[in-house]
């Protein structure tokens, strides 16, 4: 790691530097330890959260989804005990599975601030390891698009089935054709509601101005591959562009992701959103029952994927026309789910009109 450019951690609207340190391994160490010495973090600014003065000292409350409690408690309660000992605080955590506030209390304000900061860093690290639960999507499963996709599928199988790795199981479920703008880890109803509320604020702040309060007409045409070698393709996708030649869809996508990243609900992965609709993916071959979501793999291992030779497909279907579609909303879609239409269940949406 370049010491002049340390990685940044975004927590609660603030950005912290992750400093380069020399780590020492200890035998029998089983829990990941984010706690430093008792004097560390004492002067950490706390304007990102509220520390209240009480009759017995100070306290700070924070909302934490119940699935993350275990990371604060640690094995046999060791992480919690260490936090309490080193910051001279008491940390109250709701029972497993019960949503509520974690309360940090202590006689010294500096100790409460230190405990809160360490918990934030601890949770941020473990949250990044969670597989995503939701994603912002634009549905492309209108009947005309599905019909053309099925035609594409049958023609590919007819003309290219003898090419290495090409099989029927690689194709997307037509009812779930979509564009993915970004993925989210939402672990309770409060976080889902926060994402829904942010979608509505985005509509008011900039989406209506960009769309003019009307659906966006796009064309789905041509195919392209994700990796460097078309002879070893893992993801083949259909390209999408505005029919009027404008960049309004790209503007909506980029600004939505920027706003969600700034809120802490989404991690920044790219400078701009790559607008694409996955039509073939080798992850689908790995497990036909796996929900065919998008090119982001969660915990899947690249080594488990068997690539296919996409050279002929790219040559024969380079300009395949899937059709024209009216995009009328951005949906907060739930992974591993289906609604009555076969598309992903929707937790919330931003309507263009």
Image (cartoon, rainbow, N blue to C red):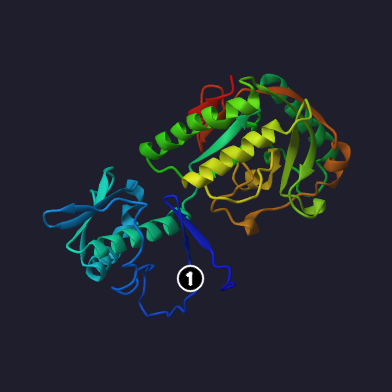
Quadrant where the C terminus sits is top right
Q: Measured along the vertical axis of the image, is residue 172 above or below residue 142?
A: below
> Could you say where residue 305 lies in the image, as x and y percent from the top left?
66, 53
* 256 relative to 93 in the view: left or right: right
Q: As rendered, which of 289 and 107 lies closer to the eye?
A: 107
Q: Is residue 181 visible?
A: yes
> Could you say where residue 212 lies in the image, as x and y percent from the top left?
64, 22
- Residue in the image at 38% along x and 60% along y: 122
Q: As rendered, which of 208 and 222 lies closer to the eye?
A: 208
* 341 relative to 327 in the view: left or right: left
Quadrant where the N terminus sits is bottom right
> Could you say where residue 109 lies in the image, as x and y percent from the top left?
23, 61
Q: Can residue 92 be seen in this view?
A: no
- Residue in the image at 57% along x and 43% along y: 258
> Could you say where residue 336 lies in the image, as x and y percent from the top left?
51, 38
* 35 relative to 209 in the view: left or right: left
Q: As rendered, which of 311 and 64 lies closer to the eye?
A: 64
Q: Measured along the vertical axis of the image, is residue 8 above or below residue 336?
A: below
């Amino acid at each position: 790691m370049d010491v002049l450019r340390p990685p940044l951690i975004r927590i609660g609207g603030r950005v912290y530097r992750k400093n380069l340190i020399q780590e020492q391994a200890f035998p029998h160490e089983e829990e990941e330890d984010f706690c430093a010495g008792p004097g560390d973090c004492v002067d950490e600014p706390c304007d990102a959260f509220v520390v209240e003065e009480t009759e017995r000292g100070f306290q700070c409350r924070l909302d934490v989804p119940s699935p993350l409690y275990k990371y604060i408690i640690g094995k046999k309660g060791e992480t919690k005990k260490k936090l309490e000992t080193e910051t001279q605080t008491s940390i109250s955590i709701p029972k497993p599975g019960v949503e509520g506030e974690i309360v940090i209390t202590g006689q010294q304000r500096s100790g409460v601030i230190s405990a809160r900061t360490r918990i934030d860093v601890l949770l941020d690290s473990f949250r990044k390891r969670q597989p995503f639960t939701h994603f912002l999507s634009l549905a492309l499963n209108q009947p005309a698009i599905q019909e053309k996709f099925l035609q594409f599928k049958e023609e590919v199988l007819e003309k290219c089935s003898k090419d290495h790795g090409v099989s029927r199981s690689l194709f997307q479920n037509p009812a779930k054709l979509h564009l993915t703008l970004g993925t989210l880890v939402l672990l309770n109803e409060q976080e889902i509601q926060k994402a829904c509320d942010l979608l509505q604020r985005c509509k008011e702040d900039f989406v209506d101005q960009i769309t003019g309060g009307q659906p966006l007409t796009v064309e789905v045409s041509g195919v392209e591959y994700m990796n460097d070698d078309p002879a070893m393709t893992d993801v083949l996708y259909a390209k999408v562009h505005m029919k009027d030649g404008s960049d309004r869809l790209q503007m909506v996508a980029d600004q939505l992701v920027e706003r969600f990243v700034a809120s802490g609900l989404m991690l920044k992965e790219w400078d701009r959103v790559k607008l694409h609709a996955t039509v073939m993916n080798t992850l689908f071959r790995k497990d036909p029952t796996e929900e065919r979501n998008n090119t982001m793999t969660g915990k899947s291992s690249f080594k488990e994927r068997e690539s296919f030779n996409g050279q002929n497909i790219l040559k024969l279907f380079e300009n395949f026309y899937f059709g024209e579609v009216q995009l009328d909303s951005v949906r907060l879609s739930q992974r591993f789910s289906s609604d009555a239409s076969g598309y992903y269940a929707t937790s919330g949406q931003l309507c263009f009109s």
